[in-house]
Amino acid sequence: MILGIDPGTKKCGFAIMTKLGEPPVKIGIVETGSLTGTLDGLLREYPIAVIALGGGTHAPPVAAQLARYGVPVHVVDEYETTLRARARYFMDHPPRGWKRWVPRGMLLPPVPIDDYAALLIAERFAAAATTAPP
């Protein structure tokens, strides 16, 4: 299983996936200060083999927290994950009413989408791992 993390200064998104193309096992958003408590529970509950950490601005302090778990951490490029997460959110939650006529690129999700960004980070890692030469 892959744990994707979108690190932020105030909140972190996380997503657990088994393999590319499968729906996520679990996704969520936690305050950055309580990330380690959440990870303690996730690592006890799921057999996570690798952590895919988004390489954004707040990645170094989060990577330092992750080192204590002994799970391999791979930093993944976050390029356009927010934009793609927004599109993925609207695929899962299509706009209704008058908002369905607004171009999707102009809509903002009504909730934080850090969990979707974390899922995209995990998927990006999984895609790179499956195409890497042996």
Image: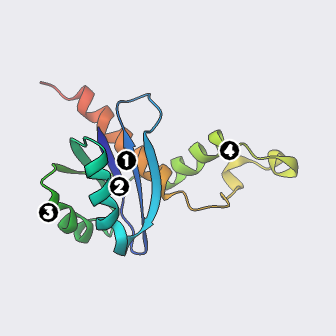
Q: Is residue 34 above or below residue 19?
A: below
The quarter of the image holding the C terminus is top left
Earlier residue among tags 1 and 3: 3
Q: Is residue 94 left or right of residue 33?
A: right
Looking at the image, residue 119 sits to the left or right of residue 98; the answer is left
Mark 4 crowdedness (10 Å alpha carbons): few <14, some 14-19, many ≥20: few
SS type, badge 2: strand
Of discs 3 and 4, which sits in the foreground? 3
CA separation, marks 1 and 3?
A: 21 Å
Element assignment for label 4: loop
- Specify the color scheme: rainbow
Q: CB atoms at circles 2 and 4 under 8 Å apart?
A: no
Pointers 1 and 2 in contact (C-beta within 8 Å)? yes
Give the mark nearest the N terminus, 3 or 4: 3
Which residue is located at x 63 percent, y 40 percent?
Answer: 92
Q: Secondary structure at mark 3?
A: helix
Label 4: which residue?
Answer: 93
Vertical placement of residue 29 versus 74, above or below: below
Label 4 is placed on what type of residue?
Answer: His
Q: Position of residue 131 (x, y in %)?
A: 25, 27
Q: Is residue 81 visible?
A: no
The residue located at (14%, 61%) in the rendering is 67
What is the crowding at mark 1: few (fewer than 14 residues within 10 Å), some, or many (at least 20)? Answer: many
Amino acid type at circle 3 is Arg
- Using the image, tell me which numbered label, if any, was put on residue 121: 1
Amino acid type at circle 1 is Ile
Residue 5's tag is 2
Sequence-wise, which precedes: disc 1 or disc 2? Answer: 2
Q: Indicate the position of residue 90 as horizontal and vertical percent values.
A: 65, 45
Q: Real-space Cα distance between discs 3 and 2?
A: 16 Å
Residue tagged 3 = 68
